[in-house]
Image: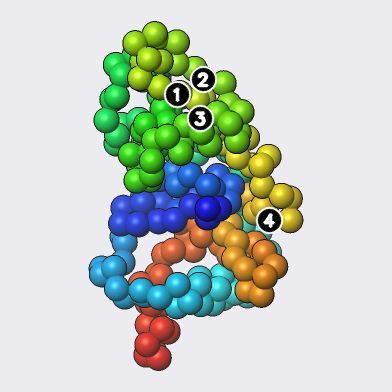
C-alpha cells in the first residue's frame, strides 16, 4: 500500500513521505501532459524520471537543489486545505470546518478507499487522536485527525531505509532494494512532456 505521492492533471507531486495516503496538491505554473497515454507504462515513466534526474544532476555544478523537509509545514497546510475544499463536508462540525484537520471520510473520498479501512488505519495503525467531539458525528463513526500529526506519524511508520530524505524525492525498487534519488519537484517536471518521447524511441 506504500506509495510515493502520485500526480495527475493539475496536481503537483510532493512527497510527504513515501505516502500511504495519496494527498494531492494543485500545480503552480506547470502544464500537465497533453494526453494521459503519452507515457502510459510504469517502466517508461520511471525511465523518463531517472534520465531527467540524471541530466539535471549533471548540469548542476555549484548550485545544490534544496528540497523541503518531510512534513514541511507549508506543504502540509496547503495539502490539508486542498483536501478539505475538494471533498464533501460530511458532518458540518467544528472539526469539519477546521482546515488543519481532515476526516477519514474525506481522505476515503479523495483516494477512493473504504471509509472503514481509512478509519482503522488512522486510529489503530497510526494511533492518532480523534479530533472530532461532536456526538452526532461520532455516532456516525466520524474520525478526524490533525494533518501535521498524520504526516509525522506516517513518516515515523516508514523504515528509515525506505524513507525519502526530503519532500520532492521519489523512491523506487530497482531490484528489491529501495532507492530514493528521483527529483520529482515542479522544476524536474518542466519539460517532462518532451521526455515522454524516449519511451517510443523518438528524438
Q: Which residue is at 31% across, 61% downward?
A: 32
**Disc 4 crowd, CA 10 A, few/some/many (<14, 14-19, 20+):** some
Q: Residues within 10 Å of mark 2 (few under 14, many from 20)?
A: some
- Percent coordinates x, y for residue 86 in the rendering: 29, 36
Name the mark nearer the viewer: 1 or 3: 1
Looking at the image, is 138 positioned above or below residue 157? above
Element at badge 3? helix
Q: Position of residue 157 (x, y in %)?
A: 66, 42
Q: Nearer the viewer, mark 1 or mark 4?
A: 1
Q: CA distance from mark 3 to mark 4?
A: 22 Å
Q: Residue at x 37, y 82 (%)?
A: 197
Which residue is under mark 3?
147
Please identify, in this view, whether the residue under mark 2 or under mark 4 is nearer the observer.
2
Q: Are marks 2 and 1 in contact (CB under 8 Å)?
A: yes
Q: Quadrant of residue 169?
A: bottom right
For residue 130, the mark is 2
User: Would residue 64 be seen by someone viewing this image from the given angle?
Assistant: yes
Badge 3 or badge 4: first in the primary sequence: 3
* Kind of element beneath mark 4: helix
Image coords of residue 90 (percent x, y): 29, 24
- How far is disc 1 from disc 4 in space, using C-alphas? 28 Å
* Residue carrying label 4: 162
Residue at x-position 53% and y-position 47%: 20
Give whichever of discs 3 and 2 has the lower sequence position: 2
Q: Mark 1 highlights which residue?
A: 143
| C-alpha distance separating marks 2 and 4 | 28 Å
User: Looking at the picture, does residue 118 appear above or below residue 100?
Assistant: below
Question: Where is the C terminus found, in terms of image quarters?
Answer: bottom left
Amino acid at each position: 500500500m506504500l506509495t510515493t505521492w502520485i500526480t495527475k492533471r493539475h496536481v503537483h507531486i510532493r512527497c510527504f513521505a513515501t505516502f500511504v495516503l495519496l494527498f494531492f496538491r494543485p500545480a503552480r505554473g506547470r502544464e500537465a501532459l497533453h494526453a494521459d497515454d503519452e507515457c502510459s507504462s510504469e517502466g517508461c515513466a520511471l525511465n523518463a524520471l531517472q534520465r531527467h534526474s540524471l541530466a539535471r544532476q549533471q548540469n548542476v555544478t555549484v548550485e545544490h537543489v534544496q528540497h523541503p523537509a518531510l512534513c514541511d509545514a507549508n506543504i502540509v497546510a496547503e495539502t490539508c486545505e486542498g483536501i478539505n475544499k475538494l471533498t464533501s463536508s460530511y458532518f458540518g462540525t467544528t472539526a469539519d470546518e477546521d482546515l488543519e484537520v481532515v476526516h477519514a471520510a474525506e481522505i476515503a473520498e479523495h483516494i477512493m478507499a473504504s471509509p472503514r479501512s481509512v478509519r482503522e488505519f488512522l486510529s489503530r495503525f497510526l494511533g492518532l487522536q480523534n479530533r472530532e467531539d461532536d456526538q452526532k458525528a461520532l455516532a456516525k463513526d466520524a474520525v478526524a485527525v490533525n494533518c501535521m500529526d498524520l504526516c509525522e506519524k506516517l513518516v515515523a511508520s516508514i523504515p528509515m531505509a525506505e524513507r525519502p530524505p526530503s519532500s520532492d524525492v521519489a523512491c523506487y525498487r530497482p531490484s528489491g532494494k529501495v532507492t530514493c534519488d528521483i527529483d520529482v519537484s515542479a522544476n524536474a517536471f518542466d519539460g517532462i512532456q518532451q521526455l515522454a518521447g524516449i519511451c517510443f524511441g523518438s528524438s
